[in-house]
Image (spheres, rainbow, N blue to C red):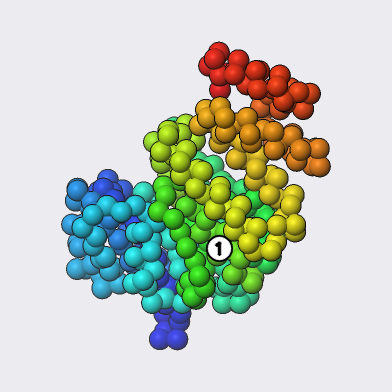
Amino acid sequence: MICSNNDPLVSVIIPAYNSEDTLNDCIQSVVCQSYENLEIIVVNDGSRDNTKAIIEKFSSADPRVILVNKKENEGRVLARDSGIKNAHGKYIQYLDSDDTLRERAIEYLLAKAEITGADMVVAPFLFHLEDGKVERSLNFDFKELSGIDYLKAMMTGKAYWCVWAKFHLRSLYEHSIVCPNISLGEDIILSTQLCFFAKKVATIHYEIINYNFSSSSTSHLDNFDDAKYEDFRVYTKWFNDYIEQSGLSEELRKEKAYFHVRTVQRCFLGKQLVEMDREIKSLVSEIKEFPCLLKVLSKRERKIVTVYQFSYWLGYLNLKRYRWQGKL
């Protein structure tokens, strides 16, 4: 696709830390996009391997590839922020360094944004699992939504929080957007704010990204250590405070209850007994109002909550028993 001077510039931001094994394919997938009016901002986040050299190889061959070099590793949140500060495009597309853009992804995303006037275009993607299987992400059952309605979809598990599946206007960052420097839940915090400021969200049905799923990922639920649990506490508190301060707490009442279910499930993973006890007690009152929440819980989680519904005291003893038996 040949671009004219009137075609909008798109900024693709790739945070990279010790990514020498995957970064070449990642950048190549962007360089080879059918839509060519791009600036490809690759943020070397203090890597100790050949990441910087790979970026320099591409930038010397293609002036669209821009190296932002950080001497110290500061994490993905600050790496993305560095990318935004160096971006000049009308639109932003994030990409993780171990994933790749599919052919014509930017072309299709941009066309939808320009035709509809959407602030954000969301798209499905492909899960590439470690056993070699490929699965498609959830289908969207809408063409256009408001940003708040799309936030509701994410809160109820009908859409994904990942920011790299959200092609969006750079002008959204002219609003007051803040992102704590955490390694778990950072996409929830950023996606929430982008949706609050996006008036219109459109969708395409073309899978835009090959997402390489790894069980060692920092966001994988099986790796829920103490540090992640602290990040979990940060983002859940931030999220609840943000919704409350927005004045939409009542409108999002049901969606907040669904989100709270996910909070309880994360508490189970973190095996934090006092936190679990408090969150389950809160969940019991929400289930009285929204009985459908029980369907979101696993069989074991439903058993635990059911005992709490009968008696908080027995529920806590039962919870301790489950933990002692190693069933949590």
Where residue 261 appears, as percent x and y from the top left, is 66, 39
The picture places residue 73, in percent across and down from the top left corner, at: 27, 52
Residue 121 visible in the picture: no
Q: Position of residue 99 (x, y in %)?
A: 40, 51
**Seen in the image, is 23 located left or right of residue 90?**
left
Q: Residue at x 45, y 59 (%)?
A: 179
**Quadrant of the frame with the N terminus:** bottom left
* Disc 1: which residue: 193
Q: Which corner quadrant of the image does residue 130 belong to? A: top left
Foreground: 42 or 328?
Answer: 328
Residue that lies at the very extreme toward the top in this rendered image: 325
Q: Is residue 304 left or right of residue 110?
A: right
Q: Residue furthest bottom?
A: 6
Could you say where residue 281 lies in the image, as x and y percent from the top left? 69, 33
- The answer to whether residue 179 of the structure is visible from this angle is yes
Which secondary structure lies at badge 1?
Answer: helix
